[in-house]
Image: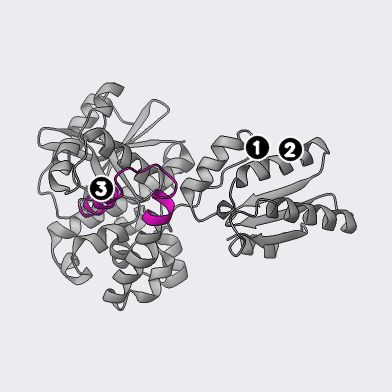
Amino acid sequence: MVKQVLQETSIPYMFVSADNVDHANTTWIGEMWETARARMKVAQTKEFLLVIDEVHKIDNWSEAVKKEWDEDTFNDLNLKVVILGSSRLLLKDGLTESLAGRYELIRMPHWSFAEMHEAFDIDVDQYIYYGGYPGGAMYIKDERRWRKYIKDSIVAPAIEKDVLRTKVIYKPALMKQLFKLGCAYSGEELSLNKMLGQLQDAGNVTTLASYLTTLDESRLLCGLKKYASDNARKYNSVPKLMVYNTALFSVQSGMTFQKAYATPKLWGRWVESIIGAHLLNQADEYDYRLYYWRVRGDEVDFIIEYNRQCIAIEVKSGRRTSNNGLALFQEQFHPVHSFVVGSGGVPIDEFLRWDIGNLLD
């Protein structure tokens, strides 16, 4: 995306990557920055763009960036800087610890249906199962190869490099098991105590909740809280597990695309998970919170909460035969919008193209 921007911009620029730089070479950022300043001065331009890729691979990168940025600010030098990195957690930690007030965060969520369709001509059912990882698109005709790619090139690096090397994880085996279990139960409510009962590495509920929060920060897996009128009930509720990308659910399900698609009740879990992933991936951008709601046997799959208002979304895809949840929720909470996605409502492929921000105006 940044390379496309560089091709279109009229601002002179310099693109560098820390990929092959020794992590202990803490002076490298300063050297690149000084080179950009020199090029800007020689060209006698009023502005210059420096792009640093994989910046998180340099030790104490945020301190080096802070030093150079503050120097430019003091000298009124209009050197714009774009910092890129594949580790969400490492970038986040560096930004919040050292660069407070000095940056604008541009979030890059998982690829949407519109993007995957335009780039790879993937249809909606393929997107529901194979998810939004562009690197895996070329392998979907060979499902065994696709599964290996997701596990080896996506899941393993995300857990081993991003999560375990960034956060203090005292029980790595428990974290890995939690991730696999959580992905396999996407779209299901599962209490932390029940999760512990299915995990081999003993821990406690507090540890498990902490690890689930870390997976959420990595935008891999989250536990949606139950919507309620007071915060105490929200935080004490049973989490509804939800993946940020349905590819993670598919590889842990042990189910092929053809078998899942041909079984309506099973396919309903994929449909609910893709709707949840679509909503989760826009939550940061539009500053809303996502919940579910349930009273006895009646439920609403997703509740968007924003500015003390809410929107209720029910997913229907043949999985649930009868449900009065939407009507009951309307009566109790009076949402701004309430609607069905799927059978008898907004078509799934249309909803997956929606910009959720338009609902919040």
| Segment colored magenta | 159-184
Q: Find residue 179 and report its horizontal and vertical position in percent.
A: 28, 51
Residue that numbered label 3 is attached to: 174
Q: Is residue 46 visible?
A: yes
Residue 166 against residue 250 in the figure, above or below = above
In magenta stretch: residue 97: no
Label annotation for residue 131:
none
Nearer to the camera, 309 or 195: 195
Residue that numbered label 2 is attached to: 70
Identify the secondary structure beneath mark 3.
helix
Q: Find residue 259 and report its horizontal and vertical position in percent.
A: 16, 69
Q: Find residue 309 and report its horizontal and vertical position in percent.
A: 37, 28
What residue is shown at x 14% (from left), y 47% (from top)? 198
Q: Amino acid at mark 2?
A: Asp
Label annotation for residue 102:
1
- Locate the N terminus and report the quarter of the image it occupies: bottom right
What residue is shown at x 13% (from left), y 57% (from top)? 265
- First in sequence: mark 3 or mark 2? 2
Identify the secondary structure beneath mark 1.
loop
Does 248 sit left or right of 20 as displayed? left
Nearer to the camera, 125 or 56: 56
